[in-house]
Image: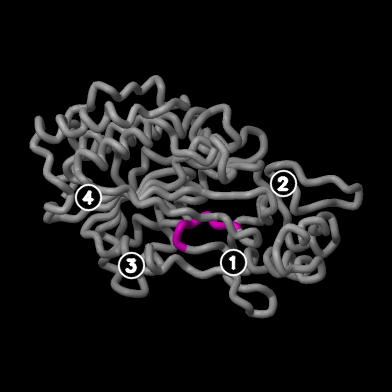
């Protein structure tokens, strides 16, 4: 059960909410001693002793999405969405420390030459698209945007002709599935970069949970395939090329791991994209097995925000519509002040 009351364990004194929007080094050894003492003081048992197994899935809580000066800060409607979400999320983790069995953190992971980055595309003037450009099937057919021939040299075993045919196939596949148009994003979540790292305050909360509960955080990388977007951690956007060849596959191992839990909590960024797509794929799996399983999925609605780029795009309506659909399917919408029983 989950009750809507403000209680549970206290927030550890090290948590400093004004610093959630900043990048800093977690003092691991100090937190180890504090977490052990915290567990002893509040009689927090190892996660292996939980009778009700609870999984918390955190989607892409990385600097690139959650720190205001970084590449794809998720503003939400308030303008400071991801920072506010992470304050609430950290507090939720600390208050429910003794009830969360395992935490799974997804990590959006990219390199320069990928289908959604500017370098992949070029126009007749030799220019690359600016971030937030939407590329449609018609744009590719009319050569408004075409594949940058230099990209093929950076993707093993692929020539320019194949890449051009694949690009059209990719845009057509998105349109056929009624998904978002191919979006050109700024370079973000770059493997090896600071933006790829977890938000410091979230990392600290996860580390504290690991020590206090003797529960290893499970990290899931996604998004490193050069020829497909990968909003959902469970499945890339496109799985086959125009010849029917397999280019990617669903993360079946993770799906099975998630569904074994008695209770599944989901939060993260962004509500309109990676969060919504992950939940959508999870719901598809559930509906193929037993629709009643949807009832054990809880969505922390005030710990996620939609993509909003003022004057350019606002995905708030799409995000809210998706969550309404998830609720109608049996998933439960909760807030961060909820206490796990």
Residue ID for mark 1: 238
Give the residue at mark 3. Answer: 256
- Up/down of 255 relative to 78, above or below: below
Write the start and end of the magenta stretch as one range: 229-234
- Pinpoint residue 301: horizontal percent, then vertical percent: 36, 43
Q: Earlier in the sequence, mark 2 or mark 1?
A: 2
From this view, report whether residue 204 is shown above or below residue 332.
above
Q: Which residue is mark 2?
A: 133
SS at circle 3: helix
Measure the C-alpha gap from mark 3 to mark 4: 16 Å
Q: Mark number for residue 96?
A: none
Of the image marks 4 and 1, the number of the one nearer the N terminus: 4
Q: Earlier in the sequence, mark 2 or mark 4?
A: 4
Q: Locate residue 308: give its quadrant.
A: top right
In magenta stretch: residue 233: yes
Does residue 228 belong to the magenta stretch?
Answer: no
Q: Mostly what secondary structure, the magenta segment?
A: loop
């Amino acid at each position: 059960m989950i009750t809507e009351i403000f209680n549970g364990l206290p927030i550890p004194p090290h948590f400093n909410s004004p610093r959630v929007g900043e990048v800093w080094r977690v003092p691991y050894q100090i937190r180890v001693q504090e977490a052990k003492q915290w567990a002893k003081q509040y009689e927090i048992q190892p996660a292996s002793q939980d009778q009700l197994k609870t999984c918390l899935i955190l989607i892409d809580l990385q600097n690139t999405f959650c720190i205001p000066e970084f590449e794809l800060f998720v503003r939400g409607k308030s303008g400071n969405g991801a920072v506010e979400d992470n304050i609430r999320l950290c507090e939720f983790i600390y208050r429910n420390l003794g009830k969360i069995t395992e935490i799974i953190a997804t990590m959006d992971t990219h390199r320069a030459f990928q289908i959604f980055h500017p370098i992949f595309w070029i126009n007749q003037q030799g220019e690359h698209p600016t971030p937030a450009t939407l590329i449609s099937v018609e744009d590719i057919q009319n050569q408004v945007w075409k594949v940058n021939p230099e990209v093929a040299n950076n993707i093993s075993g692929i020539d320019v002709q194949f890449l051009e045919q694949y690009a059209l196939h990719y845009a057509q596949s998105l349109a056929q599935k009624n998904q978002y148009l191919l979006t050109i994003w700024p370079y973000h979540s770059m493997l090896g970069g600071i933006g790829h790292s977890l938000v410091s305050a979230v990392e600290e909360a996860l580390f504290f949970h690991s020590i206090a509960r003797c529960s290893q955080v499970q990290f899931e990388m996604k998004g490193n395939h050069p020829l497909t977007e990968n909003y959902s951690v469970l499945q890339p956007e496109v799985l086959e090329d125009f010849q029917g060849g397999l280019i990617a596959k669903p993360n079946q191992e993770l799906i099975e791991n998630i569904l074994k839990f008695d209770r599944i909590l989901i939060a993260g960024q962004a509500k309109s994209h990676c969060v919504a797509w992950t939940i959508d794929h999870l719901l598809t799996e559930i509906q193929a097995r037993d629709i009643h399983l949807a009832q054990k999925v809880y969505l922390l609605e005030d710990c996620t925000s939609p993509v909003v780029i003022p004057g350019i795009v606002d995905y708030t309506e799409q995000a809210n519509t998706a969550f309404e659909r998830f609720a109608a399917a049996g998933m439960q919408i909760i807030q961060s002040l909820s206490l796990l029983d």
